Image (spheres, helix red, strand yellow):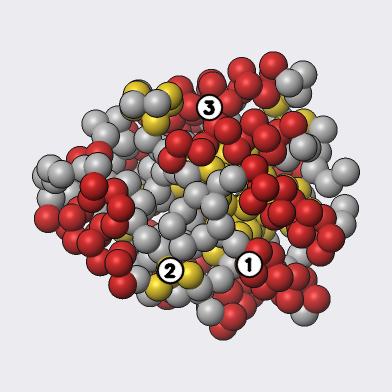
Amino acid sequence: MPGPRKVIITCAVTGAIHTPSMSPHLPVTPEEIIEASLAAAEAGASVLHLHARDPETGKPTQDPRAFEAFLPQIKQATGAVINLTTGGSPHMSVEERMRPATEFKPELASLNMGSMNFGLYPMLDRFKEFRHEWEREHLEKSRDLVFKNTFRDIQTILELGNENGTRFEFECYDVSHLYNLKHFVDRGLAREPLFVQTVFGLLGGIGAHPEDVMHMRRTAMRLFGEEYRWSVLGAGAAQMRVAAQAAAMGGNVRVGLEDSLWIAPKTLARSNADQVEKAKKMLESLSLEIATPEEAREILSLKGADKTAF
């Protein structure tokens, strides 16, 4: 069975999908990102997936200086694996999105495995009031948005990571993305063991039905055999349901306010740590053990925090 006996909990702390007006609990400033990250690690997250935001407007940014305002403090205060985004925002160029991983050479970075429609505009039906004009534009423009991740883009990021010793969380939003990953495995650019993050429930990608989860799992098993570590990300209301299904099937899980603002129906999560604690209880109720950061490093064959550039 692919996947480790101990389960890795990844926490995606702030992300680029949601906006500050959607939840008062979304971390925006460096101080808030540090506090949220450390609390999530204390709650049981062995991997912290990090984006940065403009501290005044909350707008996503890939400026390395914005990351520099929190990365050293988080690294000093916790042993958790730090996973930097190369996805950034669908509105950014791939060159812009790569800047933090290029400069800081993290142990782990996310990598989106294909271009796709990326529809966030249905959130306009739920959220009506925005403090910043960019928030409404961010959602409205997704009606005509292709999140660009071409084969050239993916190869460029893979080559960068391979040169720096950075491994990847391969984010696969649909079955075709698994085949794209297999293409890069066959070319020797994507290196095993693969950390495959299958993403469910975002408009433009595969849905979050249990059969969708099963189909992605079966396809990944057929393509990668024993040489991958499976994790899941359920968007919005699907977060915990998808996590529970995957955990029972041998997978790892990702939670956090990047993926869902909610802790229960109609109830906002007060923090990332709330979601990590809920996921941990769910995993322990299935008689599963939570991986420590060092165990996660061993499972994913990471280079170690001492070999990063921050």
User: Residue at the spot x=29%, y=48% of the render?
Assistant: 123
Q: What element carries label 1?
A: helix
Q: How far apart are marks 3 and 2 (CA)?
A: 29 Å
Label 2 neighbourhood size at 10 Å, few (<14), some (14-19), many (20+)? some
Task: Kindly identify the residue that appears in the image at 83 percent across and 46 percent down.
Answer: 2
**Vertical relation: 198 (above or below) 296:** below
Name which of mark 2 and mark 1 comes first in the sequence: 2
| Quarter of image, res 147 | bottom left
Looking at the rendered image, the disc whose residue lies closer to the viewer, 3 or 2, is: 2
Residue type pointed to by label 2: Asn
Q: Mark 1 points at which residue?
A: 177
Specify the farthest residue to the bottom.
Answer: 152
Disc 2 from disc 1: Cα separation: 13 Å
Give whichever of discs 3 and 2 has the lower sequence position.
Answer: 2
Q: Which amino acid does label 3 sit on?
A: Val
Q: Where is residue 234 in the image (x, y as percent from the top left)?
A: 53, 43
Q: What residue is disc 3 on?
A: 276
Q: Of tags 1 and 3, which is closer to the observer? A: 1
Q: Work out how far the residue at label 1 is from the one at label 3, CA to CA, in angstroms.
A: 27 Å
Q: Residue at x 64, y 69 (%)?
A: 176
The residue under label 2 is 117
Q: In which quarter of the image is residue 253?
A: top right
Check whether the beta carbons of the residues at disc 3 and disc 2 lie within 8 A of each other. no
Q: Label 3: few (<14), some or many (≥20) within 10 Å?
A: many
Q: In this view, does 246 lie to the left or right of 126?
A: right
- Judge left or right: residue 275 versus residue 287: left
Determine whether 214 is above or below 225 in the image. above
Give the quarter of the figure containing the N terminus: top right
Horizontal relation, residue 56 to residue 190: left or right: left
- Closer to us: 164 or 185: 185
Image spot of residue 183 (x, y percent): 73, 76
